[in-house]
Image: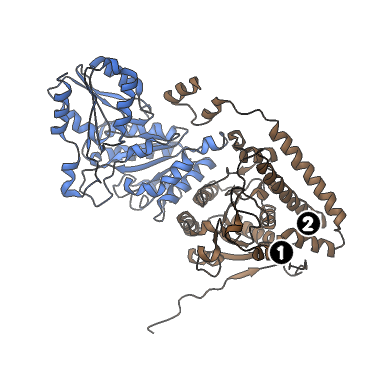
């Protein structure tokens, strides 16, 4: 036999909630009405936080900010499956994950406002600082997963990144190592289809990002990233698999970056308003509202009520952020090393 | 006390620390079953198991990146980069993360890891196997850079690095791995990081060196009243020790095997110029490699500084 088929693959795509807001009963995760409402509140909180953050930047009250608009289902849905003991290695566009895990709002805003002190991660969360160097957090998540397994801790490790990160070497090195060591790790790719101005088709020739996992010897699945139930279901399954020792999973959440790359970007230079409008119609919050309306628990008034509650929480966070006195010059030297070098100590004195 | 070479001394330090502290793990290419390409980790996987001595895929960035995640989790990983010339692909992990994690998380996470890598020229190895770009790594606030010059200090420095709460780059001069044998005591002793060692006392000229150049300097200064300082730690380097010696001798020669421009000698020279220029009788001289890429084996002896250049610098500075 000169030629034989040595491998044959399939890539699955999961959608639970369609665009009309109808859930497939076979795949619908078991969630009480109260829990689903909580998910809805978190998506609204994420949206309102984001709108306020963009406005704060426009008013010069914080610095450059990367919007998460359109990615609320991918972020809230995946983070909702996590426990506070799990380790999270984010990139920089997952504020919905932070909000879902209970990360203090003033601190998120202080970070984007340029305040170093905001980087002190609260002690009840195992979430790494924002990672701006694309994909470089991925190998670190691999290390935490190795450490968790070495310690026999029943935790999982999750790393978040975007479609652009899948082109980087650290993505390859991290995915490869996770496969080789069969680690308790979940890779969550928010494929928002744009890496600043570069569209997905110029980022990869792959038909999906999910299929990249196949080459590393573990499961990859694409989920409708604007469907919070699909994201939640896939993440929960992957976390259970990780905690049980059955190895890593790659989840591609196919979603869309509705806003500019950051407040310093103008997406009108490189993508059409028609494309944006198409995806605005697929807004993940609208979809969940249609579902809730179908269940008779949602109305425009209820949205107003929930939005007002979320706005109150965000505005309180903004007040707290702006009440912080500016950092003193000596803050430059805080925690640079456990013990400053003699030269650093001398430089600190004259600051 | 046993006479050990540097390979054995480093191996002993790793073994003793792994026995003492279950947070210490080794990871890297060929470090397990093969014991490392220089055999520095020989026998450690057999003794401590594959969970503590991990043979990784070929991935320098992920080796250091994974070590960062392990360190933040509470372990004390010791990643090995097989040769310094391959550390460049791990540079981002060192620069953007390992050195900044404590600062970026305002102390919530720290990064106590020791990256070990063989470095330096003179072993007739292929391209990129004889690099000495230590100065690149000294421009990273938050990362300590340590270079032993013999078996005894190698063990004591490595133990100190393994106990350090912050990341350390530990550069092992390959030319010295099996060249020198010294008495190395079993059990714990620490050589403090950030302190230079007077390798040879003298009065008329201070010669600063580190790593494999120390051995050449010691041979070259015979017949001169030279004080030889072995820096041992480059970042932070022992400013006080260097200044005190220069105040005494009034002359300074710095010897390193890396290229001259922006080599670490520039930092030493600038510091002495700032803090002790009035004690100097003549110019600060640097004996270094030329500003060219590290060559292959047939040219390496023209590249590395040797006794002729070192003595010429001593003779020149002693004219003042």
| Figure chain in blue | B
In the picture, measured across the screen, residue B248 lies left or right of residue A46, that is left
Q: In this view, does A232 lie above or below B264?
A: below
Task: Pick the residue in front: A326 or A14.
Answer: A326
**Residue B240: % across, % down:** 35, 20
The colour with which the image depicts chain A is brown
Q: Mark 2 sits on what residue?
A: A36
- Which element carries disc 2, helix, strand or loop? helix
First in sequence: mark 2 or mark 1? 2
Q: Mark 1 sits on what residue?
A: A282
In the picture, measured across the screen, residue A249 lies left or right of residue B124, that is right
Task: Pick the residue in front: A81 or A198.
Answer: A198
Task: Pick the residue in front: B263 or B98.
Answer: B263
**Residue A138: % across, % down:** 52, 52
- Residue B274: image quadrant is top left
> How many residues crowd mark 2 within 10 Å: few (<14), some (14–19), many (20+)?
some
């Amino acid at each position: 036999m000169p030629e034989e088929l040595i491998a044959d693959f399939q890539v699955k795509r999961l959608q639970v909630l369609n665009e009309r807001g109808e859930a497939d009963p076979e795949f619908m995760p078991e969630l009480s009405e109260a829990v689903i409402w909580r998910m809805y509140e978190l998506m609204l909180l994420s949206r309102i936080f984001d709108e306020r953050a963009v406005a704060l930047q426009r008013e010069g009250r914080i610095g450059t900010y990367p919007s998460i608009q359109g990615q609320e289902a991918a972020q809230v849905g995946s983070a909702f499956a996590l426990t506070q003991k799990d380790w999270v290695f984010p990139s920089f566009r997952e504020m919905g994950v932070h909000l879902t895990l209970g990360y203090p709002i003033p601190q998120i805003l202080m970070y984007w406002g340029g305040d170093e002190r905001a980087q002190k991660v609260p002690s009840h969360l195992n979430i790494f600082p924002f990672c701006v160097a694309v994909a470089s957090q991925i190998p670190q998540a691999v290390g935490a997963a190795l450490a968790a397994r070495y310690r026999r801790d029943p935790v999982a490790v999750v790393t978040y990144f975007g479609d652009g990160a899948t082109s980087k070497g650290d993505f390859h090195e991290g995915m490869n190592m996770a496969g080789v060591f069969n680690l308790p790790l979940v890779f969550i790719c928010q494929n928002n289809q744009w890496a600043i101005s570069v569209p997905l088709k110029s980022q990869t020739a792959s038909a999906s990002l999910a299929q990249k996992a196949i080459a590393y010897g573990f499961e990859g699945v694409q989920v409708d990233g604007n469907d919070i139930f699909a994201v939640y279901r896939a993440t929960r399954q992957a976390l259970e698999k990780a905690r049980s020792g059955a190895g890593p999973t790659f989840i591609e959440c196919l979603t869309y970056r509705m806003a500019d790359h950051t407040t310093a970007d103008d997406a009108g230079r490189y993508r059409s308003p028609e494309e944006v409008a198409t995806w605005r119609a697929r807004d993940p919050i609208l979809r969940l509202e249609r579902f809730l309306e179908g269940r008779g628990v949602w109305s425009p008034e209820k949205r107003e009520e929930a939005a007002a509650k979320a706005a109150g929480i965000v505005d309180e966070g903004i007040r707290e952020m702006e009440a912080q006195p500016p950092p003193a010059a000596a803050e430059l030297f805080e925690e640079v090393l456990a013990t400053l070098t003699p030269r650093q100590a001398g430089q600190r004195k004259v600051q | 006390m046993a006479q050990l070479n540097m390979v054995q001394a480093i191996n002993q330090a790793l073994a003793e620390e792994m026995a003492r502290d279950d947070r210490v793990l080794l990871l890297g290419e060929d470090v397990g079953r093969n014991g490392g390409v220089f055999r520095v980790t020989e026998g450690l996987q057999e003794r401590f198991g594959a969970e503590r001595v991990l043979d990784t895929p070929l991935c320098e960035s992920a080796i250091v990146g994974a070590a960062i995640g392990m360190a933040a989790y509470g372990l004390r990983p010791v990643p090995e980069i097989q040769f310094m010339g391959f550390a460049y692909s791990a540079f981002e992990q060192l620069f953007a993360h390992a050195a900044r994690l404590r600062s970026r998380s305002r102390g919530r996470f720290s990064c106590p890891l020791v990256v070990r890598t063989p470095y330096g020229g003179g072993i007739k190895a292929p391209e990129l196997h004889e690099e000495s770009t230590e100065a690149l790594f000294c421009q990273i606030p938050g990362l300590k850079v340590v270079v032993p010059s013999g078996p005894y200090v190698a063990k004591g420095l490595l133990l100190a690095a393994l106990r350090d709460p912050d990341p350390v780059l530990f550069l092992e001069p390959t030319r010295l791995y099996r060249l020198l044998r010294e008495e190395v005591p079993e059990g714990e002793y620490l050589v403090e990081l950030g302190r230079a060692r007077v390798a040879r006392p003298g009065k008329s000229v201070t010669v600063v060196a580190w790593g494999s150049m120390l051995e050449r300097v010691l041979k070259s200064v015979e017949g001169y009243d030279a004080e030889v300082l072995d820096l041992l730690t480059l970042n932070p380097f022992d400013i006080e020790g260097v200044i005190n010696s220069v105040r005494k001798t009034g002359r300074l020669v710095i010897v390193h095997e890396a290229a001259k421009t922006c080599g670490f000698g520039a930092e030493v020279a600038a510091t002495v110029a700032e803090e002790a220029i009035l004690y100097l009788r003549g110019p600060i001289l640097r004996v270094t490699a030329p500003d060219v890429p590290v060559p292959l084996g047939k040219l390496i002896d023209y590249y590395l500084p040797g006794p002729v250049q070192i003595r010429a610098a001593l003779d020149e500075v002693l004219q003042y």
